[in-house]
């Protein structure tokens, strides 16, 4: 009996380890239907494979910050409570500015994600439905952004609602109903209550479609490298069993990405909030109220992600549509591209994955990006200035001719086997290509217009020059792609080995951890109310999260060799 | 790959660093969220002075507008627009005005004492108290004035010629003739007293401030509600029936 007592006692004295109590995998993470992924997706440049994950991070951040803002937003006093959130609610300014920039990040990343998969051919078998749901998610995300932007009640949001309202109202047959559905009965309270409600209702839509999109992504598996499937659809990862386990390898990677994403989402708007004279388009704060005498000095901008449609409304060629001109511009530059993207799996049904095997789809994608950037810049620089039809042609036709013919030439070379781009380099090649093309095409278009109006030596020279830059950009990209192709394999081998001494890792991580505690201590002393201390708090908190992500990065390098 | 199961100590050290920094991040974020969800106080910085006006006509009320021992409750809102107060013209059992003297009121909950201002008006008979029960916050008509001679529910022994303020939620009773002091528990606090300013020249009443315990359920008398719009100089007196309550 006595001996037994001692036994129990010694058992109690022993501190049980966490795993002896909870087991090694208490959350059953190993059983989650999450696909394992190849190592290269977690290495340098691997972030390109995680654009969807980044959107999800931003979405999670938006839900958290948005639900908290819901505690303070009152539709019957939209501008007053928005100003109150910034000036009197503890950490309200931080919530509002990061919520705005979280939306910006999400919209931008949705575009990046879409075009990446567009050029990669991911919309082909077996991912057609996944693509279609993705395009719907893009449309709804922009809708949520529009309603959210309209909620502040500042002069820009009033303009945005009036324009949206006018376009909705001008819709034949459905106009009045659409207006009543989305904008209420005309009173300010009804308007902002509708903005708030649709902002949330559409988020529920994002949530459900995202669930379907994510399920399909897991069910269809990752898109393997093109060469592994011989550049032919269906692209299915047949080597899943060989990859490292999801937990802990991908788990730690995802946590690292989450820390970096949240850190940057908080850090960037906080830094911008402290900068003087931030243009209205990128200001993290609302503008003045429409009743303010300063309202006249605020340029009439829509949110930046709608600038391209906004500029299209200025095109005089749509005047032919009379009272429907704004609707026509929206339809041509907004609805038509959307329908095209939605229908893409039905339009491009063959099994070629390589961008150069489907030159028309590829050039439309590049043109889409170029047009969007040109029109957005144009709208930002000359908001609301009418544009004559010759000018529209001068700006929009040259990129069309150059891109389509350029891609077709490259496509011909590729099909003859004289031009090859490895899939690993394809994204960066196209990015450089687009960047040079956009800048050159834009200035070329402007110069070309000037030449049409005033034909003189200087304009002729600059037109020829900018045209030359465009061609140079295109040819240069081809060459660089070819060179990178030759080196790609060697480089890949070298770049993929990460080693860090475990002692260095310990020192670095200890320093970073001490840094996080110091920063949290310092920012906890700041006044919780007011935009300036909030921005300082955000900078600190952003760095703490980035430091945490960095320790995870070091851990993965030291112990996973990743 | 060539994962090393050794180096458990170093591995755990790095894991600890991850936990520390993630904890710091969580602490910072949590501080922000927790402080954010606590609504900042709304209210005033000082008591406003408001003239009592008739709810229907909007004109200042005179002494004759207040019925002695009225069976209806006169209610006005002060100092914020969600703080109801009683306005009572106290009389004896024959409905004759009774002069109310200033009185030192005990607060049983704290042992503190405050000076009740006594009655206002030409007969010194008009008094005013917060109409929110200090026990658990019931409001009129559940809490209301019973004139002298009317029996208090559940308190057959209570007798006073000037009557009582009694709350039918949980049976708290207050004495309006003595600064709304506690007569029967469960309340441990008298009703906050409203300080009235009577102008004999125009026969009008103004509310100036409050004294006594803090209005029930509020961080302070001046916070926890919406102030009247700036420039407001009046507060309306409404009559509500107490019959059946």
Image (tube, rainbow, N blue to C red):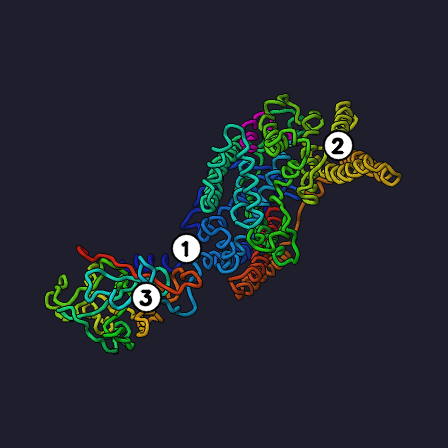
Mark 1 or 2: in front is: 2
Q: Is residue A504 visible?
A: yes
Q: Position of residue A246 (x, y in %)?
A: 53, 40
Alpha carbon distance from label 1 to label 2 = 79 Å
Q: Are marks 2 and 3 on the same chain?
A: no
Q: Foreground: A146 or A127? A: A146
Q: Which residues are magenta?
A: A119-136
Q: Which residue is mark 2?
A: A390
Q: Nearer the viewer, residue B135 or A330?
A: A330
Q: Which tag is nearer the camera, tag 2 or tag 3? A: 2
For mark 3, give the secondary structure: loop
Task: Please report contact status of discs 3 and 1: CB closer than 8 Å, yes or no.
Answer: no
* Residue beneath disc 1: A16
For disc 1, the chain is: A
Q: What residue is shown with label 3? A: B215
Q: State the image coordinates of residue A510 (x, y, percent, origin top left).
A: 59, 60
In 3D space, how far apart are the residues under numbered discs 3 and 1 (Cα atoms)? 53 Å
Instruction: Tell me: A389 left or right of B189.
Output: right
Name the main secondary structure of what is drawn in magenta: helix
Chain of the residue that carries numbered disc 3 in the rendered image = B
């Amino acid at each position: 009996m006595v001996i037994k007592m001692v036994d129990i006692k010694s058992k109690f004295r022993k501190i049980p380890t966490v795993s002896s109590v909870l087991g090694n995998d208490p959350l059953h993470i190993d059983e989650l239907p999450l696909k394992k992924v190849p190592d290269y997706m977690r290495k340098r440049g691997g972030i390109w494979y995680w654009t969807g994950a980044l959107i999800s991070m931003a979405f999670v951040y938006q839900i958290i910050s948005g639900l908290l803002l819901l505690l303070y937003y009152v539709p019957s006093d939209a501008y007053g409570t928005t100003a109150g959130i910034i000036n009197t609610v503890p950490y309200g300014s931080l919530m509002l500015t990061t919520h705005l920039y979280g939306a910006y990040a999400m919209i931008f990343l949705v575009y990046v994600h879409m075009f990446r998969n567009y050029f990669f051919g991911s919309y082909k078998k077996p991912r057609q439905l996944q693509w279609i749901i993705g395009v719907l998610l893009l449309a709804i995300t922009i809708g949520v952004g529009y309603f959210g932007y309209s909620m502040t009640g500042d002069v820009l949001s009033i303009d945005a609602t009036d324009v949206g309202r006018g376009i909705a109202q001008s819709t034949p047959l459905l106009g009045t109903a659409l207006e009543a559905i989305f904008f209420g009965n005309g009173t300010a309270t009804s308007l902002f209550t509708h903005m708030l409600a649709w902002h949330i209702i559409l988020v529920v839509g994002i949530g459900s479609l995202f669930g379907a999109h994510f399920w399909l992504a897991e069910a269809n598996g990752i898109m393997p490298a093109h060469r592994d499937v011989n550049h032919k659809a269906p692209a299915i990862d047949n080597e899943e069993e060989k990859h490292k386990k999801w937990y802990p390898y991908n788990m730690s990677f995802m946590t690292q990405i989450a820390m970096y994403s949240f850190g940057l989402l908080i850090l960037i708007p906080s830094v911008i909030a402290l900068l003087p004279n931030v243009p209205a388009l990128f200001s993290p704060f609302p503008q003045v109220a429409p009743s303010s005498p300063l309202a006249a000095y605020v340029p009439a901008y829509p949110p930046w992600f709608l600038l391209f449609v906004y500029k299209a409304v200025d095109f005089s060629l749509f005047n032919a549509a009379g009272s429907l001109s704004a609707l026509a511009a929206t339809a041509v530059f907004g609805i038509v591209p959307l329908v095209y993207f939605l229908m893409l799996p039905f339009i491009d049904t063959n099994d070629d994955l390589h961008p150069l095997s489907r030159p028309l789809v590829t050039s439309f994608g590049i043109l889409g990006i170029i047009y969007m950037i040109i029109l957005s810049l144009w709208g930002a620089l000359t908001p609301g200035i009418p544009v004559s039809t010759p000018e529209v042609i001068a700006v929009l036709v040259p990129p069309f001719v150059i891109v389509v013919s350029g891609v077709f030439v490259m496509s011909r070379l590729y099909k003859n086997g004289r031009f090859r781009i490895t899939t690993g380099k394809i994204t960066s090649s196209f990015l450089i290509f687009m960047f040079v093309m956009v800048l050159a095409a834009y200035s070329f278009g402007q110069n070309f217009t000037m030449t049409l109006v005033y034909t003189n030596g200087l304009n002729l020279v600059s037109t020829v020059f900018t045209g030359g830059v465009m061609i140079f950009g295109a040819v240069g990209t081809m060459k660089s792609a070819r060179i990178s192709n030759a080196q790609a394999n060697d480089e890949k081998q070298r770049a993929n080995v990460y080693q860090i001494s475990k002692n260095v890792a310990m020192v670095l991580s200890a320093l970073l951890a001490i840094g996080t505690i110091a920063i949290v201590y310092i920012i906890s002393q700041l006044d919780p109310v007011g935009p300036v201390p909030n921005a300082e708090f955000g900078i600190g908190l952003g760095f703490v999260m980035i430091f945490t992500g960095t320790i995870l990065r070091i851990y993965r390098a030291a112990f996973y060799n990743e | 790959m060539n994962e090393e199961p050794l180096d458990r100590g170093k591995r755990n050290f790095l894991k600890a660093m991850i936990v520390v920094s993630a904890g710091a991040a969580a602490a910072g974020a949590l501080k922000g969220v927790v402080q954010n969800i606590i609504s900042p106080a709304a209210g005033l910085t000082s008591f406003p002075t408001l003239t009592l006006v008739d709810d229907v006509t909007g004109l200042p009320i005179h002494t004759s507008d207040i019925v002695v021992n009225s069976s209806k409750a006169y209610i006005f809102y002060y100092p914020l627009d969600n703080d109801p107060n009683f306005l009572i013209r106290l009389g004896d059992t024959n409905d004759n005005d009774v002069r109310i003297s200033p009185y030192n009121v005990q607060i049983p909950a704290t042992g503190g004492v405050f000076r009740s201002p006594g009655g206002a008006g030409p007969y010194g008979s008009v008094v005013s108290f917060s109409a929110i029960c200090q026990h658990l916050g019931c409001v009129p008509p559940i809490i209301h004035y019973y004139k002298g001679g009317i029996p208090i529910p559940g308190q057959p022994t209570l007798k006073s010629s000037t009557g009582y303020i009694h709350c039918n939620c949980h049976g708290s009773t207050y004495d309006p003739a003595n600064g709304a002091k506690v007569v029967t528990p469960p309340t441990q606090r008298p009703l906050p007293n409203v300080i009235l300013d009577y102008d004999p020249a125009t026969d009008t009443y103004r509310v100036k401030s409050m004294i006594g315990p803090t209005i029930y359920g509020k961080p302070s008398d001046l916070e926890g509600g919406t102030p009247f719009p700036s420039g407001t100089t009046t507060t309306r007196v409404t009559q509500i029936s107490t019959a059946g309550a």
